[in-house]
Amino acid sequence: MVNALIVLLIVVLVVGLIATIIVYCIDLLPMDGPFKQIARLLVIVIACLIIILKALPLLGMAIN
């Protein structure tokens, strides 16, 4: 159980770092405001989904 929590913590840190870098790069792109906002939202949603998919087995829910 402790190993799974450590792995989840590492996944959260790595996914958070990668999402932060991608959002920073999106902010540097010369696009209109709404398109940047949608792109940033998509990155955050995908990052959250990855974290949730890694956390579900700890809660006893199988992912096929």
Image (cartoon, grey):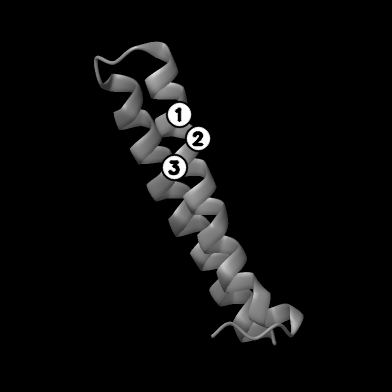
Residue 38: image tag: 1
| Residue depicted at x 24% and y 14% | 30
Closer to the camera in the image, 21 or 55 = 55
> Would residue 19 be found to the left or right of residue 12 on screen?
left
What residue did someone put label 2 on?
A: 41
Measure how far apart labels 1 and 2 are at the Cα level: 5 Å
Closer to the camera in the image, 20 or 59 = 59
Task: Tell me where residue 59 sits by quadrant.
Answer: bottom right
Residue 6 lies, in percent from the top left, at 59, 75
Measure how far apart labels 2 and 3 are at the Cα level: 5 Å
Q: Which callout, 1 or 3, points at the residue further toward the start of the chain? A: 1
What residue did someone put label 3 on?
A: 43
Measure how far apart labels 1 and 3 are at the Cα level: 9 Å
As displayed, is residue 13 above or below residue 57?
Answer: above
What's under tag 1, amino acid-wise? Answer: Ile
| Label 2: few (<14), some (14–19) or many (≥20) C-alpha neighbours in 10 Å | few
